[in-house]
Amino acid sequence: MIIALLLACFSSGSNGDCSSIDDGVQREECFFQEASLLEGDRGALSDYIQRIEDPSSQDLLRLRLAVRDPSKNQWLCDDVSTRSAQDRCRQVVGRPHLRQKKREDRP
């Protein structure tokens, strides 16, 4: 699925540049898929997010990554700029049960 989405990014004429995708939903999904590939490298992920020009897109990406894996990505909430993203991040980070691994994810 990730490969299909990345191929969609490239086949849309964007040459891998998500910001050139006209459709907003596809653009945000492209940002999310590219950022997901960088999750293991905090510095690279932070740099990637900073290169996105639209602050709302940056916040949405930070929030989506934090919600997807709060235990690993709660640090992203430190940099959100919009009030709604701050509130949502606070909700996610403030719920310890969301940061615990699911039973099927435990070794």
Image: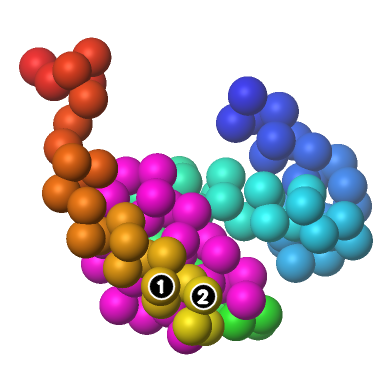
Which residue is rendered at x = 13% and y = 20% of the image? Answer: 106
Categorize mark 1 by other alpha carbons within 10 Å: few (<14), some (14-19), many (20+). Answer: few
The answer, for residue 3, to whether it is visible in the render is yes
Q: Residue 23, located in which quarter of the rendered image? A: bottom right
| Residue type of the residue flagged with mark 2 | Ser
Q: How is the image coloured?
A: rainbow
| Residue type of the residue flagged with mark 1 | Asp
Q: CB atoms at circles 1 and 2 under 8 Å apart?
A: yes
Task: Residue under label 2, please give it.
Answer: 84
Q: How far apart are marks 1 and 2 (CA)?
A: 5 Å
Task: Residue under label 1, please give it.
Answer: 87
Indicate whether 57 appears above or below 6.
below
Which residue is rendered at x = 48% and y = 72% of the image? Answer: 85
What is the magenta segment's predominant secondary structure? Answer: helix
- Residue 58's disc number: none
Residue 95 as seen in the image, left or right of residue 85: left
The answer, for residue 72, to whether it is visible in the render is no
**In the image, which residues are magenta?**
56-81
Which residue is rendered at x = 78% and y = 49% of the image? Answer: 26
Which residue is rendered at x = 37% and y = 80% of the image? Answer: 79
Q: Was residue 74 drawn as part of the magenta stretch in this picture?
A: yes
Q: Residue 41, located in which quarter of the rendered image? A: bottom left
